[in-house]
Image: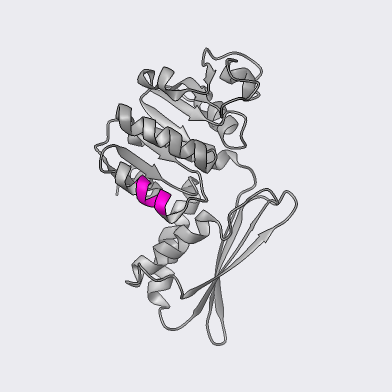
Amino acid sequence: MKVIVTAPKGKMGKLIIRVAVDRDKIDVSAALGPKGRDYIGEDAGLVSGLGYKINAPVVDDLEKVVDDCDVIIDFSAVELSMEALQIAVKHKKPFICGTTGFSGEQLREIGAAAKEIPVLKASNTSFVVGLMKELLATAAKGLSGKADIDIVEMHDRMKKDAPSGTSIEMAEAMAKAIDSENDLDFVHFHSIRSGDISSSHTVIFGCLGERLEITHHAHDWECFARGAVDAAFFMEGKPAGFYTMQDVIRAKTGE
C-alpha cells in the first residue's frame, strides 16, 4: 500500500512517516507541504528527520503525485487539509483527516466528500483513546441524570483550538449513548494550554458523595501516528462513507 502524508515537518506528519517506514506492506510514496516552503522538492525522509532518503518527494501540488497512492493521511492545517480533500475527491482516493479546528461549513464539506470517497475523520487516532470513548459511553449511560460531567483537557501552548477536537468527540460519544446527539450542553469543557504539556484528557463524573474519573495521558505523539497508519490499512479498498477510529478498533478487535 502506498500513502501520501501531508505536513512532513509537522509534529504528526514526521511521526507518521517514521511509523509507516518501519511497517511492512506500506510505503510513503510522497508528502505534501504548503506552497512556498524551502523544503519542497526534497526527499520526505530527510524533511521528516529520518536522516535518510525514502524515495518520496515532498511536493506542494498534490495533483502531481496523487494517482500513485492508495490513501492520503492528513494531519496538517485547515487550509491544506481542505485543499487535499478536494483533490482526494477528484481522484477518488481514501482520505484520513486528523486535523482539527474546522468551521461548521468546512465540516459539512468533509461530510459531503464522504458521499463520494471513504473519509475517516478523527481528532485523535490513539487506539487507547478509542477504547476510552467506549468506556465513556457506558459511564454516561449508566450515570445519566445522576452526575455532572466535566472534561478537563491539557495541551501545549501551540494548540490553537479549544476545547480540543478529542474532547468534543468524547462528548459526542457520551451524547450518542444518552440519545442527546445534537446537544452537548450537558458537558462542561475546561481547556488548558501551557508549555509543552502533552495531550491529556480527564472526564469527571461528579456524583453526590463520590466521583468517577476516566483519564488518558499521551506520553508521546507516536501513539497517534501508529493509530493513523492502522487507519490507513483499514481504509484501503473501503467504499465511500464516513468512518471513525471506532470502526478501526472494531475491525482490529474482531467486533
Q: Quadrant of the N terminus?
A: top left
Task: Where is residue 40? Give x, y as percent.
Answer: 59, 19
Q: Is residue 43 visible?
A: yes
Q: Which residue appears farthest toward the bottom when viewing the image?
A: 208
Tell me, yes or no, whether the highlighted magenta stretch contains residue 6: no
Q: Residue at x 62, y 29 (%)?
A: 9
Q: Residue at x 45, y 58 (%)?
A: 169
Task: Where is residue 182? Give x, y as percent.
Answer: 36, 68
- Horizontal side of residue 182 vs 103, given as left or right: left
Q: Quadrant of residue 211?
A: bottom right
What's the magenta bit mostly, secondary-structure-wise? helix
Q: Residue at x 35, y 67 (%)?
A: 181
Task: Where is residue 46? Give x, y as percent.
Answer: 63, 18
In the depicted structure, whether residue 26 falls above or below residue 168:
above
In the depicted structure, whether residue 59 falls above or below residue 82:
above
- Magenta part of the protein: which range? 105-110
Question: Between residues 159 and 211, which one lies in front from this camera angle?
Answer: 159
